[in-house]
Image: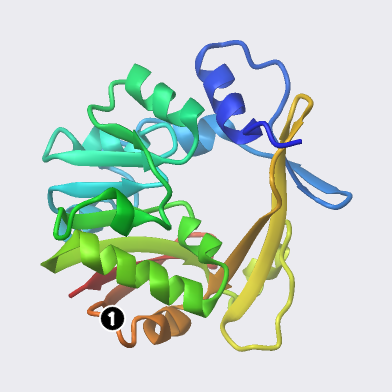
Protein backbone atom coordinates (compact mmCIF):
# COMPACT_ATOMS: atom_id res chain seq x y z
CA UNK A 1 0.00 0.00 0.00
CA UNK A 2 1.50 3.37 -1.06
CA UNK A 3 0.40 6.28 1.09
CA UNK A 4 3.33 8.73 0.82
CA UNK A 5 4.69 7.79 4.25
CA UNK A 6 7.70 10.08 3.77
CA UNK A 7 5.60 13.18 3.12
CA UNK A 8 3.07 12.36 5.83
CA UNK A 9 5.78 11.78 8.45
CA UNK A 10 7.44 15.12 7.72
CA UNK A 11 4.10 16.92 7.79
CA UNK A 12 3.10 15.27 11.08
CA UNK A 13 6.50 16.16 12.56
CA UNK A 14 6.05 19.80 11.61
CA UNK A 15 2.57 19.91 13.12
CA UNK A 16 3.66 18.19 16.33
CA UNK A 17 1.47 15.14 15.83
CA UNK A 18 4.07 12.54 14.91
CA UNK A 19 4.13 9.71 17.47
CA UNK A 20 5.95 7.07 15.45
CA UNK A 21 9.30 7.12 13.65
CA UNK A 22 9.83 7.26 9.92
CA UNK A 23 11.53 3.99 9.05
CA UNK A 24 13.87 3.19 6.19
CA UNK A 25 13.68 -0.51 5.30
CA UNK A 26 15.61 -2.96 3.22
CA UNK A 27 14.13 -6.39 3.84
CA UNK A 28 14.62 -7.16 7.52
CA UNK A 29 17.06 -4.30 8.00
CA UNK A 30 15.60 -1.06 9.33
CA UNK A 31 16.84 2.36 10.30
CA UNK A 32 15.04 5.30 11.89
CA UNK A 33 15.27 8.29 9.56
CA UNK A 34 16.48 11.46 11.38
CA UNK A 35 13.71 13.86 10.37
CA UNK A 36 14.61 16.85 12.52
CA UNK A 37 18.31 16.76 11.69
CA UNK A 38 17.91 16.24 7.95
CA UNK A 39 14.97 18.52 7.18
CA UNK A 40 14.06 20.97 9.92
CA UNK A 41 17.35 22.38 11.13
CA UNK A 42 17.51 25.82 9.57
CA UNK A 43 19.90 26.34 6.68
CA UNK A 44 21.61 29.64 7.48
CA UNK A 45 24.43 29.82 4.97
CA UNK A 46 27.02 29.02 7.64
CA UNK A 47 27.08 25.27 6.97
CA UNK A 48 29.82 23.33 5.22
CA UNK A 49 29.73 23.99 1.48
CA UNK A 50 27.45 27.01 1.96
CA UNK A 51 29.91 29.56 0.58
CA UNK A 52 30.54 27.21 -2.33
CA UNK A 53 26.82 26.81 -3.00
CA UNK A 54 26.48 30.60 -2.95
CA UNK A 55 29.29 30.95 -5.48
CA UNK A 56 27.79 28.40 -7.90
CA UNK A 57 24.05 29.07 -7.69
CA UNK A 58 22.29 32.11 -9.14
CA UNK A 59 18.69 33.02 -9.73
CA UNK A 60 16.22 32.12 -10.93
CA UNK A 61 16.91 28.86 -9.07
CA UNK A 62 15.13 25.52 -9.40
CA UNK A 63 15.28 23.60 -6.11
CA UNK A 64 14.61 19.97 -7.11
CA UNK A 65 13.26 17.56 -4.49
CA UNK A 66 13.07 20.46 -2.08
CA UNK A 67 11.68 18.48 0.86
CA UNK A 68 10.27 20.94 3.40
CA UNK A 69 11.96 23.90 1.72
CA UNK A 70 15.09 24.09 3.86
CA UNK A 71 17.26 25.49 1.06
CA UNK A 72 14.47 27.33 -0.73
CA UNK A 73 13.76 29.44 2.37
CA UNK A 74 17.39 30.58 2.34
CA UNK A 75 17.85 31.20 -1.37
CA UNK A 76 14.51 32.93 -1.99
CA UNK A 77 15.78 35.86 0.07
CA UNK A 78 18.49 36.34 -2.55
CA UNK A 79 16.70 35.61 -5.83
CA UNK A 80 13.66 33.94 -7.34
CA UNK A 81 13.49 30.30 -6.24
CA UNK A 82 11.05 27.66 -7.42
CA UNK A 83 10.89 24.59 -5.16
CA UNK A 84 9.50 21.35 -6.59
CA UNK A 85 8.38 18.15 -4.90
CA UNK A 86 6.35 15.18 -6.09
CA UNK A 87 4.61 14.84 -2.69
CA UNK A 88 1.43 16.86 -2.16
CA UNK A 89 2.10 16.74 1.58
CA UNK A 90 5.50 18.38 1.10
CA UNK A 91 4.25 21.02 -1.34
CA UNK A 92 1.59 22.04 1.19
CA UNK A 93 4.14 21.98 3.98
CA UNK A 94 6.54 24.22 2.06
CA UNK A 95 3.73 26.69 1.55
CA UNK A 96 2.97 26.68 5.28
CA UNK A 97 6.64 27.23 6.09
CA UNK A 98 6.87 30.32 3.92
CA UNK A 99 8.32 29.00 0.68
CA UNK A 100 7.13 31.55 -1.87
CA UNK A 101 6.91 29.33 -4.95
CA UNK A 102 6.39 25.64 -4.16
CA UNK A 103 5.19 23.43 -6.99
CA UNK A 104 4.20 19.81 -7.34
CA UNK A 105 6.31 18.39 -10.15
CA UNK A 106 8.23 15.27 -11.13
CA UNK A 107 11.96 15.94 -11.39
CA UNK A 108 12.11 13.53 -14.32
CA UNK A 109 9.51 15.48 -16.27
CA UNK A 110 11.11 18.91 -16.28
CA UNK A 111 10.69 19.59 -20.01
CA UNK A 112 6.93 19.22 -19.71
CA UNK A 113 6.79 21.39 -16.60
CA UNK A 114 8.94 24.43 -17.33
CA UNK A 115 9.78 26.65 -20.29
CA UNK A 116 13.13 26.51 -22.07
CA UNK A 117 15.85 28.55 -20.36
CA UNK A 118 13.57 29.19 -17.38
CA UNK A 119 16.29 28.95 -14.72
CA UNK A 120 19.84 30.14 -14.26
CA UNK A 121 20.72 27.39 -11.78
CA UNK A 122 19.42 24.15 -10.31
CA UNK A 123 19.99 22.44 -6.98
CA UNK A 124 19.26 18.73 -6.51
CA UNK A 125 20.47 17.98 -2.98
CA UNK A 126 19.42 14.73 -1.29
CA UNK A 127 20.76 12.13 -3.76
CA UNK A 128 17.51 12.36 -5.77
CA UNK A 129 19.41 12.28 -9.05
CA UNK A 130 20.18 8.64 -8.29
CA UNK A 131 16.50 7.86 -8.78
CA UNK A 132 17.20 8.15 -12.50
CA UNK A 133 18.02 4.47 -12.04
CA UNK A 134 20.73 4.03 -14.67
CA UNK A 135 23.47 5.85 -16.53
CA UNK A 136 21.06 6.35 -19.43
CA UNK A 137 18.46 7.73 -17.05
CA UNK A 138 20.99 10.07 -15.45
CA UNK A 139 22.07 11.35 -18.86
CA UNK A 140 18.42 11.94 -19.81
CA UNK A 141 17.87 13.87 -16.59
CA UNK A 142 20.89 16.04 -17.41
CA UNK A 143 19.51 16.61 -20.92
CA UNK A 144 16.16 17.70 -19.46
CA UNK A 145 17.89 19.95 -16.93
CA UNK A 146 19.88 21.41 -19.80
CA UNK A 147 16.67 22.43 -21.57
CA UNK A 148 15.13 24.30 -18.63
CA UNK A 149 18.33 26.15 -17.69
CA UNK A 150 19.97 29.00 -19.52
CA UNK A 151 22.95 28.62 -21.91
CA UNK A 152 25.37 29.68 -19.15
CA UNK A 153 23.51 27.76 -16.43
CA UNK A 154 24.95 26.00 -13.40
CA UNK A 155 23.82 23.12 -11.21
CA UNK A 156 24.72 21.24 -8.05
CA UNK A 157 23.77 17.64 -7.36
CA UNK A 158 24.98 15.01 -4.94
CA UNK A 159 25.48 11.27 -4.54
CA UNK A 160 27.34 8.69 -2.53
CA UNK A 161 30.53 7.49 -4.17
CA UNK A 162 30.47 3.68 -4.62
CA UNK A 163 34.26 3.70 -4.85
CA UNK A 164 34.53 4.88 -1.25
CA UNK A 165 34.52 2.11 1.35
CA UNK A 166 32.06 3.91 3.62
CA UNK A 167 29.32 3.72 1.00
CA UNK A 168 28.94 -0.04 1.48
CA UNK A 169 27.64 0.65 5.01
CA UNK A 170 24.52 2.43 3.72
CA UNK A 171 21.20 0.70 4.33
CA UNK A 172 20.10 -0.87 1.07
CA UNK A 173 23.52 -0.82 -0.57
CA UNK A 174 24.15 -3.54 -3.16
CA UNK A 175 27.60 -4.28 -4.57
CA UNK A 176 28.07 -3.97 -8.32
CA UNK A 177 31.01 -5.24 -10.41
CA UNK A 178 30.85 -2.11 -12.58
CA UNK A 179 33.42 0.44 -11.37
CA UNK A 180 31.89 3.60 -9.99
CA UNK A 181 28.30 2.35 -9.89
CA UNK A 182 26.15 0.63 -7.27
CA UNK A 183 22.43 0.25 -6.57
CA UNK A 184 20.77 1.19 -3.31
CA UNK A 185 17.33 -0.28 -2.60
CA UNK A 186 15.06 0.85 0.21
CA UNK A 187 11.56 1.97 1.12
CA UNK A 188 10.00 4.25 3.72
CA UNK A 189 7.42 3.17 6.30
CA UNK A 190 5.35 5.34 8.60
CA UNK A 191 2.50 4.18 10.81
CA UNK A 192 0.63 1.67 8.62
CA UNK A 193 1.81 3.15 5.32
CA UNK A 194 4.48 1.54 3.16
CA UNK A 195 6.02 3.49 0.32
CA UNK A 196 7.20 2.32 -3.07
CA UNK A 197 10.53 0.53 -3.25
CA UNK A 198 13.10 3.14 -4.25
CA UNK A 199 16.00 2.21 -6.51
CA UNK A 200 18.86 4.67 -6.33
CA UNK A 201 21.77 4.36 -8.72
CA UNK A 202 24.83 5.58 -6.86
CA UNK A 203 27.52 7.01 -9.12
CA UNK A 204 31.09 8.18 -8.64
CA UNK A 205 32.26 11.60 -9.86
CA UNK A 206 33.93 9.91 -12.83
CA UNK A 207 30.64 8.23 -13.76
CA UNK A 208 28.88 11.58 -13.46
CA UNK A 209 31.44 13.04 -15.85
CA UNK A 210 30.71 10.16 -18.21
CA UNK A 211 26.97 10.90 -18.00
CA UNK A 212 27.56 14.49 -19.10
CA UNK A 213 29.04 13.34 -22.42
CA UNK A 214 26.67 14.42 -25.18
CA UNK A 215 25.09 17.11 -23.00
CA UNK A 216 26.10 20.75 -22.56
CA UNK A 217 27.14 20.08 -18.95
CA UNK A 218 30.64 19.67 -17.57
CA UNK A 219 31.60 18.78 -14.00
CA UNK A 220 33.64 21.72 -12.72
CA UNK A 221 34.17 20.84 -9.05
CA UNK A 222 33.60 17.98 -6.62
CA UNK A 223 33.65 18.21 -2.84
CA UNK A 224 33.29 15.42 -0.28
CA UNK A 225 31.58 15.65 3.08
CA UNK A 226 32.93 14.67 6.47
CA UNK A 227 31.67 11.09 6.23
CA UNK A 228 33.99 10.40 3.30
CA UNK A 229 31.50 8.97 0.82
CA UNK A 230 28.88 11.67 0.24
CA UNK A 231 29.86 14.33 -2.26
CA UNK A 232 28.46 17.28 -4.15
CA UNK A 233 29.33 18.09 -7.74
CA UNK A 234 29.11 21.48 -9.44
CA UNK A 235 28.22 21.52 -13.14
CA UNK A 236 28.26 24.33 -15.64
CA UNK A 237 27.56 24.73 -19.34
Residue at image position (17%, 75%) is: 237
Position of 21 with respect to 11 (left or right) is right
For the residue labelled by badge 1, is the local secondary structure a helix, a strand or a loop? loop
Horizontal and vertical percent position of residue 8:
59, 25
- As drawn, 167 above or below 15: below
- The part of the image, by quadrant, that contains residue 201 is bottom right
- As drawn, 63 above or below 202: above
The N terminus, quarter of image: top right
Position of 5 with respect to 218 (left or right) is right
Horizontal and vertical percent position of residue 99:
28, 27
Q: Nearer the viewer, residue 86 or 127?
A: 86
Residue at image position (85%, 52%) is: 27
Residue at image position (41%, 76%) is: 139
Is any part of residue 60 visible from this angle?
A: yes
Q: Say few, some or many: other residues with alpha carbon within 10 Å of mark 1 (under 14 / 14 to 19 / 20 or more).
A: some
Q: Which residue is mark 1?
A: 215
Horizontal and vertical percent position of residue 142:
34, 70
Residue extending farthest to the right is: 28
Q: Nearer the viewer, residue 172 or 197?
A: 197
Amino acid sequence: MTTDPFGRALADHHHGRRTEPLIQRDGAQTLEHPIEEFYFEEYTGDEAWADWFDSVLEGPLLDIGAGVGKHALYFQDQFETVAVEVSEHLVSLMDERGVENPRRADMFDLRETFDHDRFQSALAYGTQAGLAGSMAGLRQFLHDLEVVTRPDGTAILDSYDPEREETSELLGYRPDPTPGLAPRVMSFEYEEGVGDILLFRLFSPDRLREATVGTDWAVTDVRYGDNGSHYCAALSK
